[in-house]
Amino acid sequence: MSCVASKVADKGKGEPVKLIIAAIKPFKLEEVREALTSIGVRGMMVTEIKGFGAQSGHTEIYRGAEYAVNFVPKVKLEIVVADALADEVVDTILKAAKTDKIGDGKIFILDVNQAVRVRTGEAGDDAL
């Protein structure tokens, strides 16, 4: 075990955490961020992405010519939260990101084996 890994092990694993990955429509980002902040989410990572799901893209007309848009712009949120907060985070994203139209997005919930704060070495939910 490396020196750093042993220091993390000495501090304990802390409480379990979940990784929530959400792909949403870009114009919903600020509304979702505000809703998550209001329930106590302290941070998230945001990435601009392109993808397709059930809608498989769409067609648009540009200068009179029709062309296919195979990948639709989305925003990916990655949020790590204490296990106890995960259901509330998912419900909040569902409510804030929903437009009732095709392409509203997807949410994935994964177990996180370990989270470590680089500066202090705190682990688990203490690292959040």
Image: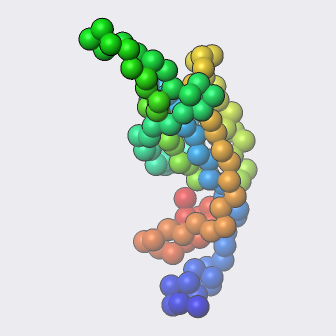
- Relative to residue 86, is residue 82 depicted above or below? below
The number of numbered badges drawn on the structure is 0
Q: Residue 119 appears in which quarter of the rendering? A: bottom left
In this view, the residue in front, 85 or 19, is: 19
Q: Residue at x 49, y 47 (%)?
A: 44
Q: Residue 46 appears in which quarter of the rendering? A: top left
In this view, the residue in front, 83 or 57, is: 57
Q: Residue furthest top?
A: 64
Q: Is residue 106 visible?
A: yes
Q: Is residue 45 left or right of residue 10?
A: left
Where in the figure is residue 4, as x and y percent of width and height?
50, 85
- Relative to residue 115, is residue 37 depicted above or below? above
- Relative to residue 20, is residue 121 depicted above or below? below
Q: Residue at x 63, y 16 (%)?
A: 100
Q: Is residue 31 left or right of residue 124?
A: left
Q: Is residue 38 visible?
A: no
Q: Residue at x 58, y 53 (%)?
A: 80
Where in the figure is residue 51, as x and y percent of width and height?
50, 37
Where in the figure is residue 78, as x and y percent of width and height?
53, 48
Question: Dividing the image into 4 quarters, which one contains the C terminus?
Answer: bottom right
Question: Dividing the image into 4 quarters, which one contains the N terminus?
Answer: bottom right
- Relative to residue 92, is residue 1 depicted above or below? below
Q: Residue at x 50, y 41 (%)?
A: 76
Which colouring convention does the figure follow?
A: rainbow
In this view, the residue in front, 54 or 8, is: 54
In this view, the residue in front, 33 or 120, is: 33
Where in the figure is residue 114, as x and y percent of width and height?
62, 68
Q: Is residue 78 left or right of residue 13?
A: left
